[in-house]
Amino acid sequence: MIKTGLFPGKFDPPTLGHLEIIERAAKLCAQLYVGVFDNKSGKACCFSAEERVELLLIACQEMRNVHIVPFSGLAVDCAASVSADCLIRGLRNGNDFIYEQQMACSNHALTGIETLFLSCSPQLMHLNATLVKEIASHGKCLTGFVPDTIERQVLAKLYQ
């Protein structure tokens, strides 16, 4: 078992794909930190870091070994701050793998940290936050896209 893992991401908003990786990683790690990236200088997120943390706290409330933390800067710095033994990354397809492999190599070169890749379930491969935002912007039901516990909040924020 991994002592401490970090699953970093934007989670804008959290999807069922994110939640699946969190649930699976939580079974592999004694403690799992979900790092919510607060991009203060880049492309703005629809949800603030505080809102994304709150949504994840709601979605993960039953998982006792999961901790939600905001961070800015590099994921490896967040990993160091929580004493993570490895980074957890989810993969949907080959494009994800190419990008994530580059990041894993860079992170290892910087700090020596390992990255554990978890493939998502086939029924969730199509899911991404951009798709969820597009569906929500038209006021459509998000069942099967985001955790039921946060669907109302996601729709309220994105359906204007």
Image (spheres, rainbow, N blue to C red):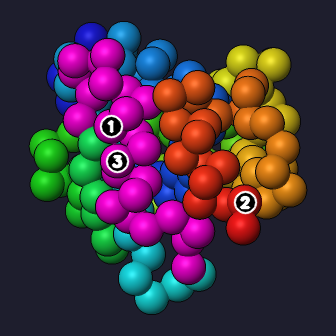
Q: Residues within 10 Å of mark 1 (few under 14, many from 20)?
A: some
Disc ID at residue 57: 1
- 71 relative position to 18: left or right: left
Residue 133: x %, y % from top left: 74, 56
Q: Decide if residue 57 is in sight here.
A: yes
- 43 relative position to 129: left or right: left
Q: What's the amino acid at mark 3?
A: Glu
Query: Tag 3, which secondary structure?
Result: helix
Q: Residue at x 66, y 25 (%)?
A: 119
Indicate whether 20 appears above or below 58.
above
Disc ID at residue 159: 2
Residue 96: x %, y % from top left: 72, 47
Label 2 vs 3, first from the N-terminus: 3
Q: Residue at x 59, y 60 (%)?
A: 157
Disc ID at residue 54: 3
Q: Nearer the viewer, residue 121 or 93?
A: 121
Indicate whether 153 appears above or below 157.
above
